[in-house]
Image (cartoon, rainbow, N blue to C red):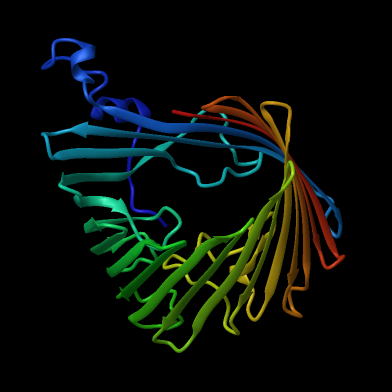
Amino acid sequence: MKKFAKMSLVAAIAVAGLTSTATAGSLEEAIKGVNISGFVEYRAEKVLKTKTDVTDEAHHDIDIRLQAVVPVNDQVNAVIRFDETADEDSDGGTLDSNAIAFDIDRAYFAYNNDGLTVNFGLQGAPLTDGGSGDGVTVSKAFGDVSLSAGYLFTTSATNADDVWFLSASGTAGMVSYYATYAMVDDSDAADTFGSAADGEADTFHAGLSAKFEMVNVAVDYSTLDADAGQRQSQTKLSLSTTLGAVNLGVQYAVNGNDGGETMVDGSDASASEISIGALELTQEGDASAFLLSASVAVGEKGTAKIRYADLDGTAARGDLQVIRANYDYQMSSNFKAYLEYTINDRDGSTKASDYVVGAKYSF
């Protein structure tokens, strides 16, 4: 659940100052100094199910994001971000192909002075999958170390009322590191921390990465302890290297007995997660998974990639194997077209094939 202010795209552009020149005298003057960034992505998808489910589904998934950074003075910017409402479009039975709704999911002032940044307003919430929250965050770089902290008094994360967090990242010699601690206070009776009453949770994420000779190594660890007694945890080891023209990678991750939902909003966006196709390790208690990948350049602009993932799941849900093949064609630096084919096989009982043709433009 995200905290949004809804408006049409026309109104959104008007807020950004792109349709009004009453005070500036010209369109060029109205948008002078405004930094516009974002992306447009379109995916046409066909899902073919076999064995226990013979239903076929076809739908599209459209993602559009537009962010405007508007200078207020030499040290303050106003930041507004417009995001397409649906995180994932539904199938043809309920999909409205003729209209796209937009939300404002970022609206804050950013103060910058000598490496110090202070954000005030509706901004990104820590340890969420793009969730938003009202509050104040502060960040500052001290040499090779960057520190940030903040307090959010309302967030999209599990209807939490209060989130305090502290984060550090940087390098020490050949090692890069990060660590984030957050304390969540949820006064909503329907909190997701395993209690029927008000609840609290402490969550901690950390990781190390380095390169030894030709091999990149990374370790990520995350945990969430709720006052109801459940402890979510997840650990992942990642290795990657390049042999000739082929890039190779392997990941292995394991959850604790209670599961691996360590993000504040219960999402699967943590660095310790393995998520591909129907496989989302966070949803499995006392489970593990590995992911193998290989990619190679095809011509000057193409890249072919193959991935295989295997989940050792619970007896109730069963094991899962995922195979995914991709071909990306980078037509220009900010535009690519791609093909994607995925096979999801749940313990030999349910098998589905997923075909995708897509394109993405970034600006």
For the point 32% across and 75% down, the residue is: 183
Viewer-proximal residue, 16 or 136?
136
Q: In the drawing, does residue 56 fall left or right of residue 37? A: right
Q: Position of 63 compared to 348: left or right?
A: left
Check the image and report above or below for 15 versus 45.
above
* Most foreground residue, 193 or 174: 174
Name the residue at 87% across, 65% down.
348
Q: Quadrant of residue 305?
A: top right
Residue in front for this viewpoint, 278 or 330:
330
Q: Where residue 44 sits in the image (x, y, percent)? A: 67, 34
- The percent position of residue 244, horizontal first and vertical second, equals 74, 44
For image coordinates 21% across by 51% down, the residue present is 121
Residue 251 drawn at (x, y percent): 66, 64
x and y percent of residue 288 in the render?
Answer: 68, 74
Q: Quadrant of the C terminus?
A: top left
Quadrant holding the N terminus: bottom left
Q: Residue furthest bottom?
A: 229
Residue in view at x 26 percent, y 18 percent: 19
Res. 62 image quadrant: top right
Say above or below: 240 vs 230. Answer: above
Q: Compared with residue 119, is residue 149 higher up or lower down, i.e. above or below?
A: below
